[in-house]
């Protein structure tokens, strides 16, 4: 096995950036990127690159090999996730790499899918290919955290985003949607939406704000995540913005098994996908919601509120990443607290989270935390 070089790190970092662009796009599959590099007398030359296509279509390695053509013979393949070894919807990528004459493969991390889990690397080595595993592994693991959690724990990665005023409120009672964050934060939030498979809010927020929850960045309109509404009693109005647009961007409604059948029928007729789950008087458990979403293929979930949903996910210890944006506004009287039964300042100090980023989006400040050891 050859040692990890600085060049390996650089090509893997480039592959990682490419793979990141596909987040939220190819679920339930992981978004993988592969680069094919030839060692020429003047130094390394990139001859092929590929990313995972939509589910059922080609994997990253095959796209990269097609791009490289005959130039792949004798070259190195940098790939963020272990090449697959199984006949799934596509034949094994490990065999495709061998057949194309790839001489060395550099892998970010092993595939947590039990059908692969090291066998892709074995297949390559048995065919005489030189394989290096674990280049930039910590960074690559972040990309595939949702894919890994879905495989191992039957739940997606959960990213909670909160926007609060300077005095710590998320809105004013009875006032509908209040602008808390400025335009730069909104762009950032829409970027976050594009990187997730699904976005979730509670019915309180859906009724109060009548939001769209789409990604509205120029050129990224097709990157809107599935919109999930936790709505125990199926109260979402058929003439809400969400329902009216559900043919273009899906809406999934998670309601109690005993929710009103007439309401469910009307929503289903309008195109809403209904997910019935067990519920108690206290509501629907976050773990039940996450398992239902994982069953339907969701690997990365963004939670956008309101207070009740955010608190229940935090209290159940089901938040992996947390971003709090503080807008340049004071709400004052009648403010709605960001959380119920929890103090946001305590959550931000909780040692189980580590800070990955903090700074400003224009006039707003933000802090981004991630569960340690994730
Ligand atoms: C790769 N390269 O680009 C991806 C891989 O249903 P299939 O046949 O598409 O297989 C999906 C599985 O393949 C997925 O669960 C994961 O284990 C692996 N994903 N593997 O070699 C890729 N996306
Ligand atoms: Zn594959």
Image: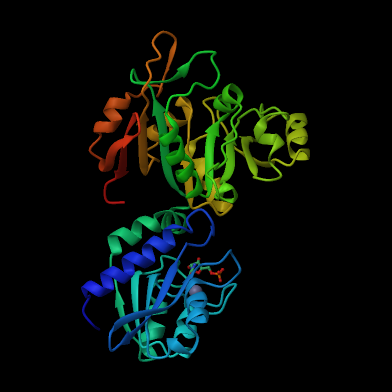
Say left or right for 86 vs 9.
right
Q: Is residue 255 left or right of residue 200?
A: right
Please state the horizontal and vertical placement of residue 183, each as a whole percent of the image. 44, 33
Where's residue 55, x and y in %? 59, 64
Measured as percent of width and height from the top left, residue 185 is found at 41, 35
Q: Is residue 24 left or right of residue 354?
A: right
At which x and y percent is residue 186? 46, 35
Q: Residue at x 40, y 23 (%)?
A: 338
User: 50 above or below 128?
Assistant: above
Can you name the residue that lies furthest to the top here?
Answer: 333
Above or below residue 312? Residue 354 is below
| Res 53 quadrant in image | bottom right
The answer to whether 158 is drawn above or below residue 206 in the figure is below
Residue 124: tell me if it is visible.
Answer: yes
The tally of labels here is 0
Q: Which residue is found at the position 29% from the left and 64% from the top?
A: 137
- Nearest the eye: 288 or 236: 236
Question: Residue 208 is drawn in which quadrant?
Answer: top right
Q: How is the image coloured?
A: rainbow
Q: Locate the N terminus and report the quarter of the image it occupies.
A: bottom left
Q: Is residue 254 left or right of residue 354?
A: right
């Amino acid at each position: 096995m050859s040692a990890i070089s600085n060049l390996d790190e650089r090509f893997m970092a480039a592959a990682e950036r490419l793979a990141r662009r596909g987040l939220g796009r190819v679920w339930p599959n992981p978004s993988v990127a592969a680069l094919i590099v030839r060692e020429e007398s003047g130094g390394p030359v990139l001859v092929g690159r590929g990313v995972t296509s939509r589910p059922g279509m080609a994997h990253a390695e095959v796209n990269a090999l097609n791009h490289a053509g005959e130039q792949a013979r004798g070259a190195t393949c940098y790939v963020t996730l272990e090449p697959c070894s199984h006949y799934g919807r596509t034949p094994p990528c490990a065999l495709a790499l061998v057949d194309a004459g790839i001489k060395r493969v550099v892998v970010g991390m092993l595939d947590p899918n039990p059908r692969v889990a090291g066998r892709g690397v074995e297949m390559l080595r048995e065919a005489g290919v030189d394989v290096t595993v674990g280049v930039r592994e910590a960074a690559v693991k972040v990309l595939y955290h949702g894919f890994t959690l879905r495989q191992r724990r039957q739940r997606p990665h959960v990213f909670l985003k909160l926007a609060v005023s300077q005095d710590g409120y998320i809105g004013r009672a009875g006032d509908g949607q209040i602008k808390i964050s400025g335009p730069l934060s909104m762009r950032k939030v829409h970027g976050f939406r594009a990187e997730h498979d699904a976005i979730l809010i509670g019915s309180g927020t859906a009724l109060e704000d009548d939001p769209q929850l789409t990604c509205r960045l120029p050129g990224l309109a097709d990157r809107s995540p599935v919109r999930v509404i936790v709505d125990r009693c199926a109260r979402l109005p058929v003439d809400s913005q969400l329902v009216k647009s559900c043919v273009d961007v899906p809406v999934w409604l998670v309601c109690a098994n005993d929710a009103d059948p007439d309401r469910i029928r009307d929503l289903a007729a309008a195109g809403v996908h209904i997910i019935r789950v067990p519920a108690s008087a206290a509501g629907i458990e976050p773990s039940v919601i996450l398992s239902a979403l994982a069953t339907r293929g969701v690997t990365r979930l963004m939670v956008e509120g309101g207070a009740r949903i955010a608190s229940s996910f935090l209290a159940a210890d089901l938040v992996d990443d947390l971003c709090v944006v503080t807008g340049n506004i004071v709400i004052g009287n009648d403010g709605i607290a960001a959380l119920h039964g929890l103090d946001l300042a305590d959550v931000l100090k909780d040692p189980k989270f580590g800070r990955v980023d903090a700074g400003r989006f224009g006039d707003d400040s933000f802090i981004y935390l991630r569960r340690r050891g994730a």
